[in-house]
Amino acid sequence: MTLHSAIASTTPTFDSLEQALKHYFGYDRFRPGQRHIVETALRGQDLLVIMPTGGGKSLCYQLPALLKPGLMVVVSPLIALMQDQVETLNDNGIPATFLNSSLSNEHVQQRTAQLLRGEIKLLYVAPERLLNDRFLPFLDRLHDALGLVAIAIDEAHCVSEWGHDFRPEYRQLSQIRQRYPTVPLLALTATATQRVQQDIVVQLALRQPDVYVASFNRPNLYYEVRPKERNAYADLLREIRSHRHGSCIVYCFSRKLVDETADRLQQDGIVALPYHAGLSDRVRTENQTRFIRDDVQVMVATVAFGMGIDKPDVRLVVHYNLPRNLEGYYQEAGRAGRDGEPSRCLLFFNTGDVSKINYLIDQKPDEAEQMIARQQLRQVLDYAEGLECRRTIQLRYFGEDFSGNCQQCDNCLNPKPIEDRTVDAQKFLSCVARCKERFGMNYIIEVLRGSRSSKIQQRGHHKLSTYGIGSDRSAEDWKHLGRSLLHQGLLDETSDGYSVLRLNARSWEVMRGQRPVQMVATRSQRSSVADDSQAASTRELLMDLLRSLRKTIANEQSVPPYVIFADSSLRLMVQSRPTTLEEFASISGVGSHKLTQYGPRFTETIRQFCQEHGLLAQTVTPVVDEPTSKPPLSARRRQILNLHQQGIAPAQIALECDLRLGTIYDNLATLLEWGEVIDVDQLVDPERQQAILGAIAQVGDDALRTIRDQVGEDYDFNEIRIMRSVWRMQQLS
Ligand code: ADP
Ligand code: ZN
């Protein structure tokens, strides 16, 4: 085979594609798939190329452009990327150029002239320019004069609403096929879902395309999931320090967390910058440039960061918060090691993040959206809590059968200790059975742990044989077990948004004792005998915690942290660990204003910390003169009640307690029925109360849904829940 260079000024011929590859790009070998794709493109067939980030997609259209007469048009969504690619090509002596809005008129004219003279092989344009009324006639001229090798559409998933980055201007690209019916189209993307692939073919009107799906395995990446504990920051710092000479990206959930984390890293001597949508374009571009230039080692960012960068030598990508879906995680983590060198992807996992995401899902107005988001979250949990090879789990999500032991992930290298939980699983599953498979995880756990909640009493579930048989374990532990049963397929959950637990054939095998259940051992209790160094590190932890609380409050009020409390006050708090307002008042630096302003949040933080570290026997709350009919409150309920009575809004309480908003309202409603003082006007707009009460009077107080149907969509279940309790109390008096 003889291949001719198509660059006007040179006339080399090549004996093989490998030779051409070496000549233009300096590489000795094609990466998997590249050769096949280049050959197909040279034949002039339509192509859909799905290749993970770093797989080497660009070469798939660049090399054909150099071996065929005519011009290759490349549609690319981001100016920064275009510039980058063109620079790299020019650097290899390849005549490429771009046209976009960042250019002066003079430059545009210069480039169009070069194009018309046939001096350029690759032309990069943004979709909106390509379809522009003035540009299309120009492209017609190029087409007639030089011929178009093909039109390559990069980031082709942007055409699909099902992708993670839909761009309406991509939709219009279908015109291209009509205008140039004989020009081949090459669509390229790193997005793998079937749905998006189908969309690309349809939307771009590809003609019997050769679909090339590369393996999504990235062998050079090491994957690890680590429990996120109180001292996660120290962990993060250690990781970054151990990559002293490599670039790192740290992804956080929110702008606020990005800023805080970047701040803290800076204070610890790491050159880190933030990146999120709250920063101005100028600052964002500047920070990104400094990162790309290695002036800055660490970019702390929201997921807004990454799509526009091609940095090949990122050595560490940390997800400091739980990602919302697995595809997103794969793409973001995949920004590590594009150059094929060993790199790490680390995910910090805690259940607090799960509650936060659930909370956000609850806020979504659209039920279908909620359902999709819940399912995506479950897939992330499958990954984070799974015991299998992480790679296997990820690739299975993309429909790829890897099923192996990659020896390049934490689960393969350090299999977790396993314990037998058959008996607990039997308790759990029987409880699901006894409750007639009509409830969700939290309810089942309440029954197992013998909760006194009125809804359990009303349904008579306190008489079930499984009521209270799980009171020896924490709700958290039961949740862990329940989720693990779901992951292992020993239990099902409906995906209609209500997440009702259902038994399957395997559940019954477990209950009949035909199938043992094994799980990762939960962490053993910390030893209560604290040696000196442990005590010191505990103090450090608490100090960190208080410092970050102080910083949070300072940020809320836009003042420097020392305005809230001096370091010396924080140190005193660490020493004496006040958990009541009275104790807190005795700390030097706490005046009456600060006592009421900040006391509740600080004491609550300290109390929780003490509980988690076994530092204090649980504070005994004396029960004074409470009528005997009132059940004693659990610590959780008491906390919710206290926060509410301090005037804190339910949404804020939900965040502080790591519970769903609905749960907070639920608890407040129950507390109201138990005769506790609840500020109903704070919870339900006084103008809306009568309507709800009226509806209850008509349809009764049984089912929230019935009441809601009566009162109308405008009213939410939380309001209705509270008013139902008000109504019940009115009936008693
Ligand atoms: P993608 O667009 O798929 O994310 P790129 O086209 O940017 O990937 O390629 C990723 C990196 O791999 C680039 O640094 C590129 O130069 C390099 N690369 C591409 N093909 C080869 C090859 N055959 N051999 C060596 N390196 C390659
Ligand atoms: Zn593995």
Image (cartoon, grey):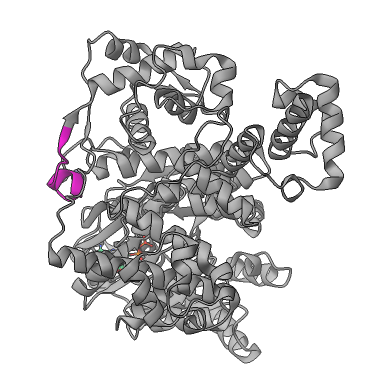
Relative to 200, is 516 above or below?
above
> As rendered, which of 573 and 42 lies closer to the eye?
573
The answer to whether residue 366 is left or right of residue 422 is: right
| Residue at 34%, 25% in the rendered image | 470
Locate residue 16, reporting x and y percent: 22, 60
Q: Is residue 586 above or below residue 160?
A: below
Between 576 and 119, the one nearer to me in the picture: 576
Q: Say if the magenta span includes residue 414.
A: yes
The residue sitting at 38% across, 68% down in the picture is 66
**Residue 98 placement (x, y as % from top left):** 52, 77
Q: Residue furthest front?
A: 625
Q: Residue at x 15, y 40 (%)?
A: 405
The answer to whether residue 162 shows anywhere in this view is no
Quadrant position of residue 317: bottom left
Q: Quadrant of ligand 1?
A: bottom left
**What quarter of the picture does the N terminus occupy?**
bottom left
- In this picture, is 508 found above or below 162? above
Residue 632 in the image: state x and y as whole percent.
Answer: 50, 35
Q: Which residues are magenta?
A: 407-418
**166 or 261: nearer the eye?**
261
Q: Nearer the viewer, residue 274 or 664?
A: 664
498 shown above or below 95: above
